């Protein structure tokens, strides 16, 4: 039988695989870097050529992905298994697109590794695909088995045009997966267009998706191309598809069926070549049973379903994600990246993260701004992490207190009201001081009463107007922090109009 070639600069890895394969009666030949492999391929006889190549991805003598490319050029039918301790998405996708048989992250289970090698020996070659360059910064990170499954799925779907449904909780990174599917697809040179179907009012969503002709309705001063036209030749990402109104679902089904649609007020059919990726945090099967979602549209979208795990199911990824977000926040703010202690990491790993990866990113941004020292200790973490049971804001996946509404604030002591002193006083702000109240479980009304008592005792006669301004400022700033500054989304979540929030921001001096 032909030997299994093992390429790894780590002697212990080579030794372990050699001994395990020997016990399975599988001959081996080992190399320390890719150059040795290429030299051996030049002189090897057909009987001594490799049956399977198992290669590390990063070695002093060269890249495993480069070796993969050169070996596949010489021996297209050779199954190649890529090993790596750097478990990022780009490595997985590059391995698959370069023609790899499988992607094996370290540390691996030896029994499963041997099973994989045996399967590689037995199965036929995979279809050769073009290699993809690896960016210096991976777009998604994850060492957890659940994320490795996601990476493998993205790798396998990268050369397909099939419709994909991404499910997962809010904040788990569904749009990142959609962008990765687009980036590593044959449509990568085309546009990626994303639309949150739940954030756009029903009356506007049809025009957003399909466009409108001039004069189609009041205010339609000119013809406008919709998202389906904008995404022609590329990918259209429909986020929160489960919230789409029922009548619009019929029009969407028609586009998915034959690739044609009409602009609002239009009479000519428009053809479009778009790959649709949909996402939702809802149970669409249940929505179908309730009559809120069309069953035929569900089956049309649910060709391939990709479940994105919540952060609590991949706690081993929290350390690497935390350090990545701290580095990212530091770059955005133009400051030196902060370090985080093991004790702080341990607390983060024990936190439930109802807001998932987005909440962790917000916390890291808050720590970059608010942590007093360059080294982040456990005591520097926001209150919802230190005492999650009494902070329902964490249960709601909200931005940590201080990320926007109390930025750089230095609180002053407040007088006691009915024996209760608020734990978090109002913030000093010369324009419109937003309210920073305690979590609901800590009698936040006492803080409101204390500030009102203080203003009344000072002799002011505009207490109502002053407190109203502070209350509105607090709501608007918190909503903007939650939507990352997107005013339309903030207005929608607050239940007010876009013009109202713009006017209030100007009136309150929140620009």
Image: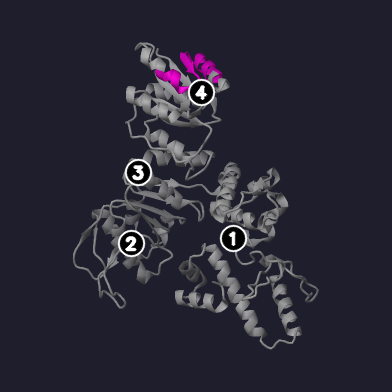
Tell me the crowding category of disc 2: few under 14, some 14 to 19, or many 20 or more residues within 10 angstroms, Cα based: some
Q: Is disc 2 placed on a helix, strand or loop?
A: helix
Q: Nearer the viewer, residue 99 or 395?
A: 99
Of the numbered discs 3 and 2, the one sitting upstream in the chain is 3
Tell me the crowding category of disc 4: few under 14, some 14 to 19, or many 20 or more residues within 10 angstroms, Cα based: many
| Quadrant location, the N terminus | top left
**Mark 4 or 1, closer to the camera:** 4
| Quadrant location, the C terminus | bottom right
Of the numbered discs 4 and 1, the one sitting upstream in the chain is 4
Q: Is residue 47 left or right of residue 167?
A: left
Q: Quadrant of residue 69?
A: top left
Look at the image and name its color scheme: one colour
Residue 401 x %, y %? 64, 62
Q: Please name the residue that numbered disc 1 is placed on.
A: 399
Q: Nearer the viewer, residue 225 or 178?
A: 225
Q: Quadrant of residue 16?
A: top right
In this picture, is 282 found above or below 217? Answer: above
Q: Is disc 1 placed on a helix, strand or loop?
A: loop
**Mark 2 or 4, closer to the camera:** 4
Task: Give, as a single range, the part of the protein colored magenta.
Answer: 15-38
Q: Is disc 3 placed on a helix, strand or loop?
A: loop
Residue occupying the point 69% across, 88% down: 461
Q: Quadrant of residue 110?
A: top right
Measure the C-alpha gap from mark 3 to mark 2.
Answer: 26 Å
Residue 508 x %, y %? 57, 77
Residue lying farthest left?
268
Residue occupying the point 25% across, 75% down: 215
| Numbered label attached to residue 419 | none
In this picture, is 107 found above or below 508? Answer: above
Q: Please name the residue that numbered disc 4 is placed on.
A: 8
Q: Please name the residue that numbered disc 2 is placed on.
A: 249
Q: Are the two marked residues, 3 and 2, in contact with CB atoms closer than 8 angstroms?
A: no
């Amino acid at each position: 039988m032909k030997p299994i070639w093992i390429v790894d600069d780590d002697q212990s890895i080579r030794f372990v695989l050699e001994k395990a394969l020997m016990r399975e009666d599988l001959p081996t030949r080992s190399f320390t870097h890719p150059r040795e492999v290429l030299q051996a391929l030049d002189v090897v006889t057909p009987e001594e050529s490799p049956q399977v190549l198992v290669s590390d991805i990063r070695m002093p003598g060269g890249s495993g992905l480069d070796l993969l490319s050169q070996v596949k050029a010489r021996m297209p039918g050779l199954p190649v298994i890529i090993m790596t301790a750097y478990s990022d998405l780009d490595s997985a996708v590059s391995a698959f697109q370069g023609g790899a048989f499988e992607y094996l992250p370290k540390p691996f289970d030896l029994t499963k590794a041997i099973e994989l090698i045996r399967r590689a020996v037995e199965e036929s070659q995979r279809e050769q695909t073009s290699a993809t360059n690896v960016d210096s910064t991976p777009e998604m990170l994850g060492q957890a088995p659940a994320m490795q499954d996601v990476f493998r799925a993205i790798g396998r779907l990268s050369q397909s045009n099939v419709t994909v449904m991404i499910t997962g909780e809010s904040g788990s990174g569904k749009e990142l997966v959609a962008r990765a599917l687009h980036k590593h697809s044959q449509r990568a040179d085309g546009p990626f267009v994303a639309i949150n179907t739940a954030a756009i009012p029903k009356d506007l969503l049809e025009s957003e998706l399909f466009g409108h002709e001039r004069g189609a309705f009041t205010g339609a001063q000119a013809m406008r191309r919709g998202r389906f036209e904008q995404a022609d030749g590329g990918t259209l990402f429909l986020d929160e598809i489960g919230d789409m109104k029922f009548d619009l679902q019929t029009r969407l089904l028609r586009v998915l069926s034959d690739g044609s649609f009409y602009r609002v007020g239009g009479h000519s059919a428009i053809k479009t070549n778009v790959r649709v990726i949909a996402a939702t945090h809802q149970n669409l099967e249940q929505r179908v049973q309730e009559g809120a979602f069309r069953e035929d549209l569900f089956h049309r979208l649910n060709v391939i379903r990709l479940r994105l795990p919540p952060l609590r199911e991949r706690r081993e990824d929290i350390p690497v994600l935390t350090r990545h977000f701290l580095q990212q926040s530091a770059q955005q703010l133009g400051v030196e990246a902060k370090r985080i202690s093991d004790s702080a990491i341990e607390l983060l790993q024990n936190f439930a993260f109802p807001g998932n990866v987005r909440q962790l990113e917000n916390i890291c941004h808050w720590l970059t701004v608010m942590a007093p020292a360059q080294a982040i200790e456990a005591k520097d973490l926001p209150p919802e992490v230190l005492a999650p049971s009494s902070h329902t804001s964490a249960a709601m996946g909200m931005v940590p207190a201080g990320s926007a509404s109390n930025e750089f604030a230095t609180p002053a002591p407040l007088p006691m009201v009915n024996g209760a002193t608020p734990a978090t006083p109002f913030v000093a702000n010369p324009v419109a001081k937003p309210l920073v109240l305690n979590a609901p479980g800590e009698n936040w009304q006492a803080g409101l009463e204390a500030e009102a008592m203080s203003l009344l005792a000072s002799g002011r006669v505009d207490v109502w107007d002053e407190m109203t301004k502070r209350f509105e400022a607090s709501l608007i700033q918190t909503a903007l922090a939650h939507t990352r500054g997107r005013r339309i989304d903030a207005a929608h979540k607050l239940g007010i109009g876009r013009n109202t929030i713009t006017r209030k921001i100007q009136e309150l001096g929140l620009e």
